[in-house]
Image: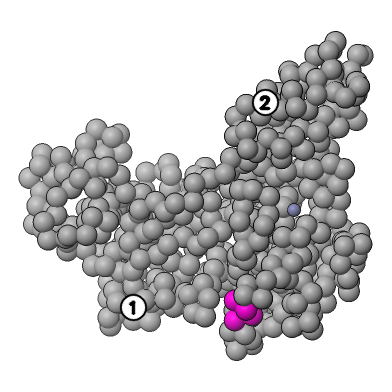
């Protein structure tokens, strides 16, 4: 529950290509399941600008960010793929491999390696191919310059497993086809770069560079998997989130999940997107609500009216807002098939609230989990009596059994490596519970106010009022299991 920093981090990315025309291929990589940002996603080589990148002297580039990003792109390509781009003149395979090893060990910088091996580096020769900024919903945001580079003759990329799981050459059309069939997850910069590559060689760098503008028309479109569009709406959720991710799922018939804002301006943006989709023959048929919290329901009435769509939710959601279809565990919500089967299965996943549901898209192994899991660091608030820690952990366990691959949470960033994330969250909760037990005594009762600073010593004090609610949920779980008991205004270990 630590609020993340929202400032941009400078970064760079290399679109490494080889061949011409129909033979054109691009080198892309799969991010490891263990990385915190976009685990399991496809990406291009790249990463954050570091101090040595920023210190590299490139007389012909005056802009500090651009200069550092050009050097960063070269360094990241070398570290991640073993390919040295932006080289004027020659470098032997042996010196390139040696420099890569030392860079990865942190034993050298690109400038030092160039000096050692007598390389003539020309960061200014990389071809600018666009500037992308991570959208608002992500807990970590990057300001990234893209550069296009032809594979230098005699070099060949390879991946050392670590942050990256694998890499491959792919033809853009084949990559888009795999995406369309739901086999791959990646962010908008990858999608729009692939589209520009698939459109041919003429003016390639300029067309790739237009990607951010194309992706933002009419509003920023985030389609991490084909048929799954994320539209972040500004809302007032529990901190640290500032948005709710509304999802549009499907091809011709769409389910709209959690339109959280009723603000006319925010709805105008959403409707600009749905109008754009309508022109592609895609229409909202269902408005699905994962639970009753206002940051998930704010736009429901307006969307129901706008689309003539049925509002779908758990039966007990009806005590908070009018619904047209009450669903229960295992119900199927059919949507017209396209390249994929879009039928959603309802899972009752209480714990955050009693009326929480998640949506399971079996063909994609994708879970739309509402507030069951956070889309970033920290955890979800469990606020009794609506929140229930035992039910919450049982819901997490149950979702893990479905072996989902991708999580689409209502706040923060979607994620691959879904089972690993769920397991980590369960472990995190049980660690917290162990701290609760340690903080309790069998004699003296302790109040929530006394326990919070001990149990949440790793959490900022401004979050303690929320932490206290989850603490109470842990105590109620321990009481239900016979391990703790109320005593006066506090809690103590149960005397067995
Ligand atoms: Zn909620």
Q: Which residues are magenta?
A: 268-272
Front residue (pair 468, 306) = 468
- The total number of labels drawn is 2
Q: Residue placed at 10% from the left, 39% from the top?
A: 116
**Label 1 packing within 10 angstroms: few (<14), some (14-19), many (20+):** many
Q: Relative to 308, is 184 above or below?
A: above
Q: Position of residue 316 (x, y in %)?
A: 91, 59
Numbered mark located on residue 453 in the image: 2
Q: Residue placed at 61% from the left, 48% from the top?
A: 240
Asked if one can make out residue 168 in the rendered structure from this viewpoint, the answer is no
Which structural element holds mark 1?
helix
As for residue 271 lying within the magenta part, the answer is yes
Name the side, left or right, on which 135 lies relative to 287: left
Asked if one can make out residue 104 in the rendered structure from this viewpoint, the answer is yes
Image depth: mark 1 or mark 2 in front: 2
> Which quarter of the rendering shows the C terminus?
top right
Name the side, left or right, on which 336 lies relative to 188: right
Which residue bears the numbered disc 1? Answer: 207
Look at the magenta stretch and give its main secondary structure. helix
Residue 60 appears in which quarter of the rendering?
bottom left
**Label 2 packing within 10 angstroms: few (<14), some (14-19), many (20+):** some
């Amino acid at each position: 529950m630590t609020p993340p920093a929202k400032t941009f981090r400078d970064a760079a990315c290399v679109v490494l290509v080889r061949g011409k025309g129909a033979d054109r291929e691009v080198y892309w990589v799969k991010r490891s399941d263990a990385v915190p940002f976009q685990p399991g996603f496809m990406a291009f080589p790249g990463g954050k600008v570091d101090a040595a990148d920023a210190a590299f002297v490139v007389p012909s580039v005056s802009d500090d960010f651009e200069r550092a990003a050009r050097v960063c792109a070269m360094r990241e390509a070398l570290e991640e793929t073993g390919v040295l781009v932006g080289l004027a003149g020659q470098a032997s395979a042996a010196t390139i491999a040696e420099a890569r090893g030392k860079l990865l060990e942190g034993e050298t910088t690109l400038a030092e390696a160039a000096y050692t091996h007598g390389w003539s580096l020309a960061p200014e020769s990389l071809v600018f191919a666009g500037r992308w900024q991570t959208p608002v919903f992500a807990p970590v945001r990057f300001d990234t310059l893209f550069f296009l580079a032809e594979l230098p003759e005699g070099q060949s990329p390879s991946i050392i497993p670590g942050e990256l799981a694998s890499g491959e050459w792919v033809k853009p059309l084949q990559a888009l086809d795999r995406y369309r069939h739901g086999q791959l997850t990646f962010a908008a910069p990858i999608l729009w770069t692939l589209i520009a590559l698939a459109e041919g060689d003429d003016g390639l760098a300029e067309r790739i560079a237009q990607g951010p503008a194309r992706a933002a028309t009419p509003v920023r479109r985030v389609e991490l998997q084909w048929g799954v569009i994320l539209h972040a709406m500004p809302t007032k959720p529990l901190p640290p989130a500032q948005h709710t991710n509304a999802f549009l799922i499907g091809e011709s018939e769409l389910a709209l999940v959690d339109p959280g804002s009723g603000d006319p301006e925010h709805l105008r943006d959403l409707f600009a997107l749905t109008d754009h989709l309508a022109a592609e023959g895609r229409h909202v048929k269902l408005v699905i609500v994962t639970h009753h919290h206002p940051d998930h329901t704010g736009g429901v009435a307006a969307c129901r009216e706008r689309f003539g769509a049925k509002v779908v939710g758990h039966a007990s959601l009806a005590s908070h807002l009018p619904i047209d279809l009450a669903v229960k565990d295992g119900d199927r919500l059919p949507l017209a098939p396209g390249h994929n089967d879009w039928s959603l299965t309802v899972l009752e996943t209480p714990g955050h609230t009693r009326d929480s549901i998640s949506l399971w898209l079996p063909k994609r192994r994708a879970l739309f989990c509402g507030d069951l899991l956070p889309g970033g660091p920290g955890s979800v608030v469990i606020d009794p009596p609506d929140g229930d820690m035992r039910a919450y952990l049982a819901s997490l366990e149950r979702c893990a059994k479905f072996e989902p691959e991708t999580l689409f949470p209502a706040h923060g960033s979607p994620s691959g490596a879904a089972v690993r994330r769920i397991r980590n969250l369960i472990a995190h909760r049980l660690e917290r519970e162990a701290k609760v037990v340690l903080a309790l005594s069998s004699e003296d009762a302790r109040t929530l106010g006394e326990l919070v600073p001990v149990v949440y010593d790793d959490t900022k004090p401004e979050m303690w009022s929320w932490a206290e609610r989850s603490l109470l949920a842990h105590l109620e779980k321990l009481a239900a299991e016979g391990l703790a008991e109320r005593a006066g205004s506090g809690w103590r270990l149960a005397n067995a």
